[in-house]
Image (cartoon, rainbow, N blue to C red):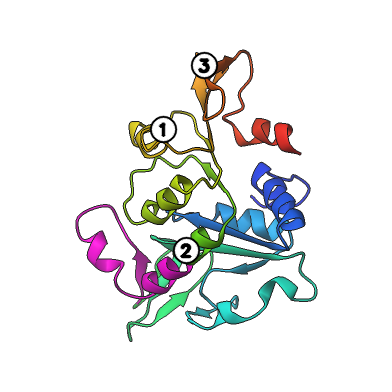
């Protein structure tokens, strides 16, 4: 249910980044859902995801070359780079990539454009729109000055090679999640990264922190692994 009177935590985070990062934020996600779009819309940002933001959106490689963060009437630009596709993406009968927002059923003669788990997903990502989305995501990761990962488990070889390369090169990273996966710890702590903070739930009501500066420690009676509570530390 849409409620513009209630500002969700992700919207507050997007607004903060827009105000502090030259009106441009990039979100790289493996999720199919529309939460990022919803949050960016509440932040009154222009959304770039590879498609025209029309009722029927056609995919284009050239939209991103515009100065979208300077568009009049928007608070800034949010790149939502869905490297595994979206619930709103389809291919039509001519194999054209099309965005049809908020459909409850699959339109006649259209096929969902999402990369599902399995061995075939690696082949599918060589096709459009994924080739372009991955290319832009890699470029944004390379250009970023730091990273905030929310709920990501570092278990997808599509996304993380560029990210790991950047954090090994001393770029800062913060990870907040209910439970840190072994892959996350190996990718960051095991790779001897120099500038990280990893945050997870501990003992149901506490927070466990792994820090490159202070080691491992516990914060009692605080749930900083939840985005809403984490934002209280930085906003």
The quarter of the displayed image where residue 154 is located: top left
- Where 63 falls versus 36 (above or below)? below
For residue 216, side relative to residue 83 (left or right): right
Residue 133 on the magenta span: yes
> Could you say which is closer to the camera, residue 195 or residue 89?
195
Mark toward the start of the polypeptide (3 vs 2): 2
Give the SS element for disc 3: loop
Mark toward the start of the polypeptide (1 vs 2): 2
> Which residue is the site of mark 1?
189
Q: Residue at x 52, y 16 (%)?
A: 204
Range of the magenta residues?
110-136
Give the SS element for disc 1: loop
Q: Quadrant of the C terminus?
A: top right
Could you say where residue 166 lies in the image, as x and y percent from the top left? 46, 52
Q: Nearer the viewer, mark 1 or mark 2?
A: 1
Mark toward the start of the polypeptide (3 vs 1): 1
> Which residue is the site of mark 2?
137
For residue 116, side relative to residue 163 (left or right): left
Could you say where residue 80 lies in the image, as x and y percent from the top left? 55, 62
- How crowded is the residue under tag 1: few (<14 C-alpha within 10 Å), some, or many (20+)? some
Could you say where residue 100 lies in the image, as x and y percent from the top left? 50, 72
Q: Can you see residue 205?
A: no
Q: Residue at x 33, y 49 (%)?
A: 156
The quarter of the displayed image where residue 234 is located: top right
Mark 3 vs mark 2, CA separation in Å: 34 Å
Q: Can you see residue 156?
A: yes
Q: Residue at x 72, y 63 (%)?
A: 23
Question: Which residue of the protein is positioned furthest toward the bottom in this rendering?
Answer: 94
């Amino acid at each position: 249910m849409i409620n513009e009177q209630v500002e969700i935590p992700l919207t507050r985070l997007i607004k903060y980044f827009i105000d502090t990062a030259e009106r441009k934020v990039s979100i790289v996600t493996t999720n199919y859902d529309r939460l990022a779009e919803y949050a960016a819309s509440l932040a009154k940002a222009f959304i770039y995801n590879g498609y025209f933001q029309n009722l029927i959106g056609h995919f284009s490689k050239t939209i991103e070359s515009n100065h979208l963060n300077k568009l009049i009437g928007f608070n800034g630009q949010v790149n939502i780079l869905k490297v595994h596709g979206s619930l709103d993406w389809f291919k039509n009968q001519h194999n054209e990539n099309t965005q049809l927002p908020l459909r409850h059923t699959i339109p006649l003669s259209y096929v969902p454009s999402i990369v599902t788990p399995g061995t075939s997903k690696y082949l599918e990502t060589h096709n459009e729109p994924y080739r372009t989305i991955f290319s832009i995501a890699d470029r944004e990761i390379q250009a970023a000055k730091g990273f905030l990962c929310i709920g990501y488990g570092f278990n997808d070889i599509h996304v993380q090679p560029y990210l790991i390369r950047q954090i090994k090169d001393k770029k800062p990273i913060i990870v907040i999640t209910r439970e840190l996966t072994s892959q996350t710890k190996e990718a960051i702590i095991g790779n001897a990264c120099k500038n990280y903070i990893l945050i997870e739930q501990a003992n149901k009501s506490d927070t466990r922190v792994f820090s490159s500066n202070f080691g491992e420690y516990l914060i009692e009676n605080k749930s900083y692994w939840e985005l809403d509570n984490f934002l209280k530390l930085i906003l």
